[in-house]
Image (cartoon, rainbow, N blue to C red):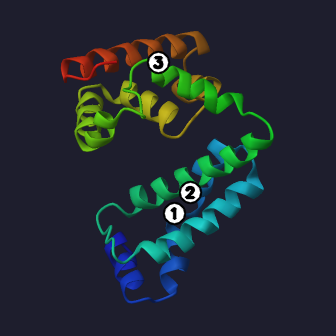
Amino acid sequence: MDDSGIVERYLQRDETAIALTKERYGARLRALSFGITQDRETAEECENDVYLEAWSSIPPHEPRNYLYAFLARIARHLSLNRCRDRARLKRGAYLVELSAELEQCLPAPDDLACRLDEMVLREAINDFLAGLDAEKRNLFIRRYWYLDSVAMLAKRFGRTEGSVKTALHRLRAQLKTHLEKEGYVL
């Protein structure tokens, strides 16, 4: 069944929508969550929470053309929240490392103008990503959306860790330049 049909079942409050979602996207959602949490049990819990959140969110949302993206966003946020909860007990250096990498090229989240310009910023980042070749775009997204480690990226793209680090450094510098041209003060 296609995404539109699954969403239609959610809209009709048909519980088979959850089973269809799990069948179609369960493994991908679990893998996304595991990539962030590094814990299989937590990843499974997050996957189940995604289905609950989707059930609660559809309606009013009707992600007929972007169901996986809708679910992945939920999974990512749930997984990051689990990591933050764990980090309260012990600081997670991995998430701090990723935050430090991107803070040099993104506007400060506490800046009121940044909050008001969230949609414009999103569009600027999407424009930046659209201008990259497929490998660079995938490298950037795998690192900063899926939170893959440098070692995982090196293996996935058949590169050395050093070349991945260099490529990511250059991509962050390009993003910074792009955002500055768009009028963001960093």
CB within 8 Å, label 1 to label 2: yes
The relative height of residue 45 versus residue 115 in the rendered view (above or below) is below
Q: Amino acid at mark 2?
A: Leu
Q: Residue at x 63, y 68 (%)?
A: 48
- Label 2 SS: helix
Q: Quadrant of residue 1?
A: bottom left
Of residues 122 and 35, the one nearer the viewer is 122
Q: How many marks?
A: 3
- Label 1 SS: helix
Question: What residue is shown with label 2?
Answer: 29
Q: Is residue 51 left or right of residue 151?
A: left
Q: Residue at x 38, y 89 (%)?
A: 12
Q: Amino acid at mark 1?
A: Tyr
**Residue 90 visible in rendering:** yes
Question: What residue is shown with label 1?
Answer: 25
Mark with earlier residue (3, 2): 2
**Residue 31 location (% of width, % of height):** 61, 50
Question: What residue is shown with label 3?
Answer: 168
**Residue 86 location (% of width, % of height):** 75, 45
- Label 3 SS: helix
The relative height of residue 89 versus residue 174 in the rendered view (above or below) is below
Mark with earlier residue (3, 1): 1
Q: Quadrant of residue 23?
A: bottom right
- Give the spatial CA distance, label 3 vs label 1: 29 Å
Q: Is residue 185 left or right of residue 166?
A: left
Camera-nearest label, 3 or 1? 3
